[in-house]
Each structure stands twice: as structure tokens, then as C-alpha cells.
Amino acid sequence: MTRTIVESKTKTAVIGFDEPFCVIGERINPTGRKKLAAELEAGDFSTVESDAIAQAAAGATVLDINAGVVYNSNPNPNETEPPLMRKVVELVQGLVDLPLCIDSSVPGALEAGLETAEGRPLLNSVTGEEDRLELVLPLVKKYNVPVVAISNDDTGISEDPDVRFAVAKKIVERAADFGIPAHDIVVDPLVMPIGAMATAGQQVFTLVRKLREELGVNTTCGASNISFGLPNRHGINNAFLPMAMGAGMTSAIMNPIALPVKQAEIEAKKAEIAAAGLIIPADMDEETFCQLFGLGSTKPKAGKEMEAIMAANFLTNNDPHGGKWIQFNKAPPKAGEEGRGRAGRVGGRRRRA
């Protein structure tokens, strides 16, 4: 069976057909996050720190690291991104001991990440474009790391799944020319938005099966692409992920956490309740308030997508006896009771003398 090994200094993540689904946390990425981009340019890494810790706590298997900030002071990413990538990798692996995924379109940043990362990171990514193949595959070989292969080439992203399969096959074959085995290629067949293409789900399920059966490779995707532009995106994602797993997908680049409720949402709900003539006890804390009125939580926690993945792992016997599912669904300890056992004593049952 195909097994792709990704490692930190002390932990190993295995992406494979008979392994638990690999969740690659996507949050450390300034693309589309103006606040994070501004923080990184200013040398403020507080959001990176909180995102790393929250994703690890939510159950991410691997953390994607993207330092693609276009500085206002210097718009040349070839100069600014490599040192920033090095800094972010050092910071993250000093906070959490999870394998990393080094993510960049800048070759110098990819190499900076590979030089800095401990263990055996995943490289994100190579495409079927000729210049990209010639730049990235030598790095994959040099550092002996696995790589994400995205199924587009010089002609762009095809809506035809057969074309995307052909691109993936081309990348696998070119990698073999460099001595890179198929088990170190994790193919992203590209998930199209279901709102724009009605067959997008069916396409990716068929592609994943074909990639597994004919090329023997592991697969990944940007999971949230499927629901882009639609209402209740979590509902679609929650259905898509177990279906993709059933088709043979072995990992996804995704957000594992449910983001905290914004203060503005809490205030709006309180105003709505007050307008209805209801009185909230003055001593009710905001976390209890959010739970009571279905707003979510004031703290980051595992999202519904993680719940769907954990359940699917259990149903496919990749969580034997459901131990991880049971642990995932345990209520967190109340304040002051952390570390206490069943009888309320620190450390649990007393041992007999």
C-alpha cells in the first residue's frame, strides 16, 4: 500500500490508503488575510503563534506554512519571502511538534523552508508547467521529501477531469525521471466549486479513484473550494469530506478549527434578546451565553469538518474501537478541574498500597 511519510523532529504522519485521514492545517497563510499580512510585514507573529497552537489542539496532523506576503516596502517576493519563511518555520516548530508543509510559489522560499524544517516536511507544490517541474523536482530529490502535485500545466486548469488526470500522470512520470517514487507524490486533482460546476463533486470522486487505482498515489485538495460562494459552506464541506474519503482521498488542506464568535455578533444577539423583552442574568459569562443561544464559542475549537472526518475514520476502521472518536467528544474539564480523575481527585483513582 502507498504510504507517504512526513515527519517533524519527533513525530511521524503517514498519509496512506489504510491510514487515518491526514488534515493539513491551512491557517498560517496570509493570502486573503490582510490583517495577517500586515502583521507579518511588521514583524508581529502573534497570529501565527495562536493559529499554530489552535490548529494543533483541533487535531491537525500537519501544518501548512505559507509566507507569501507582498511587502509594501519591497514588492519583490524573491527577496522578502525566503527570510520570512525561515522565521515562520522556526517559530512554528518551536511551538508545536507537528510535521510541516512548506508552501510557496517562490523557489527560494521553498528551499529556505526545507533548510529550516526539522524532520521530513511535505513540499507544496509542483505543477505540470515545464519551468515549475525543472525548478521544484530537483529540490524534492535533493532534500528527499514528498511533494504535492497540482493537476494544472502551461494551459491552465482544465474543466475536463481526463486532462487533469493526464497532467498528474505526467508529473508522476517526470518525478520518476529524477528518482522520486510515486509514494512521495501527493496529487491535488483540483476541486472545482460546486456552485459553478454541478458535476464538481462527481468529478473529483472519480478522479481520486482513478489516481489511486492507476497511479497508486495519495491525494489531497483544498477542501473548502467545493463550497466557494455558497451559503452554509460548512454543511457542504461536512458532506464532501467523508464522501471524498470514501472515494479514496487520503488528505486535505483545510481549516481544522471553528473560529471564535466575534464580539460584534455577541453584542448583536444581546441587543436582539433585549429587544424581545428577555432578561439575561447579569453574572452569565459570554461563553455560556454563546453556548445557550447557539452562537458557537468564544474560543477556537475543532470545527464541524473535523467532526465529520473523525466520524468517517471510525466508520472506515481507521480508528479501531473508536478511541479517538470518544476522546474527541469528551466534554472539556470545567475551570479548576483540569487534571482531575473520575473521582474528582488529581491523578484519578488512588493506588492500593
Image (cartoon, rainbow, N blue to C red):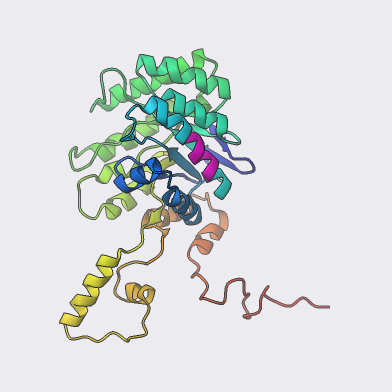
Q: Say which quarter of the image contains residue 71.
A: top left
Q: Is residue 117 above or below residue 273?
A: above
Residue depicted at 41% across the width and 30% down the height: 80
Magenta residues? Answer: 85-91
Q: Dividing the image into 4 quarters, which one contains the N terminus?
A: top right
User: In the displayed structure, would residue 39 be above or below residue 136?
Assistant: below
Q: Position of residue 65 (x, y in %)?
A: 45, 39
- Residue 148 is situated, as x and y percent measured from the top left of the image, at 44, 30
Q: Nearer the viewer, residue 296 or 311?
A: 296
Q: Quadrant of residue 307?
A: bottom left
Q: Residue furthest left?
A: 275
Give the residue displayed 38% in from the left and 29% down from the top.
210
Image side of residue 332 versus residue 291, left or right: right
Furthest toward the right, the residue is: 353
Question: In this rendering, is residue 91 above or below 325?
Answer: above
Secondary structure character of the magenta stretch overall: helix
Residue 124 x/y as whole percent: 43, 31
Residue at the spot x=27%, y=43% of the render? 226
Query: In the picture shown, does residue 135 fall above or below 291?
Result: above
> Per the image, is 89 magenta?
yes
Which of these two is toward me, 34 or 157? 34
The answer to whether residue 96 of the structure is visible from this angle is no
Farthest residue in the front direction?
73
Q: Is residue 197 magenta?
A: no
Quadrant where the image shows the C terminus: bottom right
- x then y, percent, for residue 170: 39, 17
Q: Is residue 56 visible?
A: yes
Q: Which residue is more in the foreground, 348 or 16? A: 348
Q: How many marks?
A: 0
Place residue 117 in its image quadrant.
top right
